[in-house]
Image (cartoon, grey):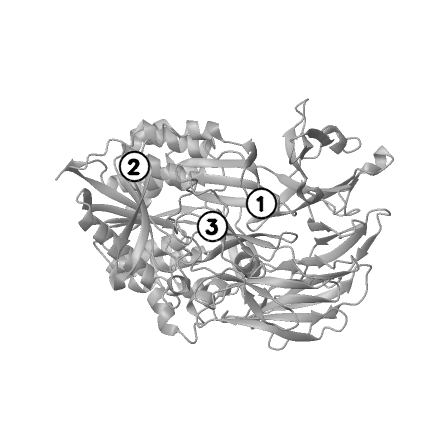
Amino acid sequence: MRAAIILCLASVVASPAAFASDTGGSPHLAQGLDAMFNKGAFWGKGVQLAWENDGESYTILEPSADGKGVDIVAYETATGKRSVQVSAAQLTPENAKTPIEIEEYSWSADGKELLIFTNAKKVWREYTRGDYWVYDTASATPEGKLTKLGGDAPESTLMFATFSPDGSRVAWVRANNIYVEELATKKIAQLTSDGSADIINGTSDWVNEEELFLRNCIRWSPDSRQIAYWQFDQSGVGEYTLINDTDQEYPVTFKYKYPQPGTTNSAVRVGIVPAAGGATQWVKLAGDPRQNYIAQMDWAGGSDGILLEYLNRAQNDNQFIWANAQTGETRVVTEDTDNDWVDVNSMEWIERAGAVKDALFLSERDGWRHAYRLDLKSGQPILVTNFQGDVLDKSAIDQKGGWFYYLASPDDPVRQYLYRSRVDGKGSPERVTPSDESGNHRYDIAPNGKWAVHRYSTADRSWRFEIVSLPDHKVIRTLVDNNDVATGVQPWLSSKTEFFKVPVDNGITLDGYMIKPPDFDATKKYPVVTYVYGEPWVATVRDAWDPYIRMLGGLIAAEGYLFVSIDNEGTPSPKGREWRRSIFDAIGVLSSAQQTQAIKELAKERPYIDASRMAIWGHSGGGSTTLNVMFRYPGVYSTGVALAPVADESHYDSIYQERYMGLPAVDVKGYHDGSPINFAEGLQGHLLIIHGSGDDNVHFQGTELLINRLVELGKPFDMMDYPNRTHNLNEGKGTSFHLFSLMVRYIEDHVPPGGVAR
């Protein structure tokens, strides 16, 4: 009955005014949520920039003078000299009234041809299917300048169109087959013909896309004569059914292949096919193709062979394998192993004399995530980043200067900065980001290593984009400052983010942050709202702008709460391998234990925390952690809100769960102990579960199983189902505003806001 009441109350949250009057929440909160989710007021602007001429110039999109579409505008990097390279009028197809709407664009290697992606449609999480056009800047005739690719292919059916290195052709994927189109003649060659619902060429199945980020699965050879590609055979993979109850008079179903832990995976292999058409040469790999992953693949510096990462199903052994492009014969170059799991790498290349190139990869073999240079012949890795700290991410390789640029923060794990090391491994790392710019820094470095787009933010200040020179980091010009966002959020963010450290068992110290009420009075006691994730995928404690969480945290704090987030061990912080691998075989167990220890210790240290008024919430893995805390440590938090949680780890996808838990047949106890459903009898207090019935990632099935268990135990709880929403829970007009209005109201109902006398 209580769950039904919640559903009914949620349905009337239609406006900020209604929210404020129905729940007692302040108008400030209602207006802030409305501005966030209905008006998109705080997201800020970005930059679609493409480097040209080795970095000596770049292009960006700017509104055209007549307001119809956008121009592609070129700037000289050093001087800022501006010129319209391709106008919106030039991007207007024959007989069309409006120019092409540019979703993405890229230039051919010689800069003469422009590839435009438009009319994009969503495929699972990303908009990767659409239409492609080529604009030829060198064409002598207007009618030859703008051409739509794909021949008579239906609208929005092409994926991952990519120029050949010589710019003469474009490869693309349609309906799980690979095609190559010759730009001069418009002739189309179909390279594969076995594509079907089960045979996938040139792109990937659901789980490899989600967990290994394999989307564009075609690779041109440097000489433009061959294409290497992934093929997935998902026959035999378990089929999942989503039910849509609302779009038609009768329910309809959608089915797709989704492997759960321990079940059948797709068989994966790599083939090499002539770009003009012909037979595929399959790479000869040992082992069962359903018990291994081809996590990455690229041409190994030249056109005679490819380098691929061959990852075993347990994901603790990653072989770097060189394959002959003509024969498919292979040899293992080197191997990266770990007792728990290994991370996969994007392919990066370091030039040597002649046409020889070395690979650069990341490994945690010495206890830190470090970069190594790999000679493909000897297989001998050479340490490049010699310091006591982790490489957070690869930025670029300055081939001429001999530098490897990367993100790191060896002394300050909640922030990140640009460093560089010599690619020969000699010398010590150098910090490039100025020492007085504390925060989160990201870089898009030009091919020549002389310039970069610098993106900078803090937890309380939105992103700023600028061009800087390297390595002196001198600001050349500002691209987007987002000062309007920075000014606009101030009425909602009167309290600053405070970072802290808190000890837990075994001498471990965790990082956290807190946002206090604007009228905070240390002589009073305040309730706590904790935002949690707790799994290896995301660290929440970062000194970086996150308009979603930062704004929500500020609004909740303004109601009279302490908004808190803490990163337990196992989250991807730059604290070394042992920190990150500590969660292996302990998903759900370690996080819930340390989150509970941390908040109890914080309450001891800070007498203004009211431990009798505390709520915890999280999404996805954070929803799972919320359930585990509420079930395994009853009474610590009186209220929990779990969004799209994994209630039973045996029902999540194979790659993610097996990476961090091992195979379920081997670790029956681990899967049991990490699954909140098995501890539901411990629930005390108030629990709201929120899920979308169209979630293709964390299935609604798990929540339904949990509901059955809670009903069986006689445990009261509350539930909200958003019909047909995916894991993001944001599809449909008003959904995000409705969801977070519901969540905050639920917390206010059960954890009253405001400071009270001690």
The residue tagged 3 is 727
Q: Mark 2: few, some, or many residues within 10 Å (few <14, many ≥20)? A: many
* Residue 598 sits above or below residue 323 on the image: above
Q: Amino acid at mark 2?
A: Ala
Query: For the residue carrying disc 1, how many other residues have a C-alpha within 10 Å: few (<14), some (14-19), or many (20+)?
Result: some
**582 relative position to 322: left or right:** left
Q: Residue at left 47%, top 42%?
A: 434
Location of residue 471 by image quarter? top right
Residue 726 versus residue 345: which sits nearer the camera?
Answer: 345
Judging from the image, what secondary structure is the residue with disc 1 in? Answer: strand
Q: Does residue 4 sit above or below 652 in this rendering?
A: above
In the image, which is nearer the foreground, mark 1 or mark 3? Answer: 1
> Label 3 is placed on what type of residue?
His
Among the two numbered marks 3 and 2 on one chain, the one whose residue lies closer to the N terminus: 2
Q: CA distance from mark 1 to mark 2?
A: 35 Å
How far is the residue under mark 3 from the one under mark 2?
Answer: 26 Å
Q: Residue furthest front?
A: 427
Residue 210: x percent and y percent? 53, 57
Q: How many marks?
A: 3
Residue 444 numbered tag = 1
- Helix, strand or loop status at disc 3: loop
What amino acid is labelled 1 in the image? Asp
Query: In the rendered structure, which disc, 1 or 3, sits on the residue that comes first in sequence?
Result: 1
Residue 720 percent location from the top left of the image: 37, 46
Say whether residue 738 is visible.
yes
Residue count near mark 3 (Cα–Cα under 10 Å), binned few <14, some 14–19, many ≥20? many
What is the C-alpha distance between the residues marked 1 and 3? Answer: 30 Å
Q: Work out whether 6 lies above or below 384.
A: above
Residue placed under numbered mark 2 in the picture? 557
Where in the figure is residue 561, as x and y percent of width and height? 26, 39
Q: Is residue 105 left or right of residue 474?
A: right
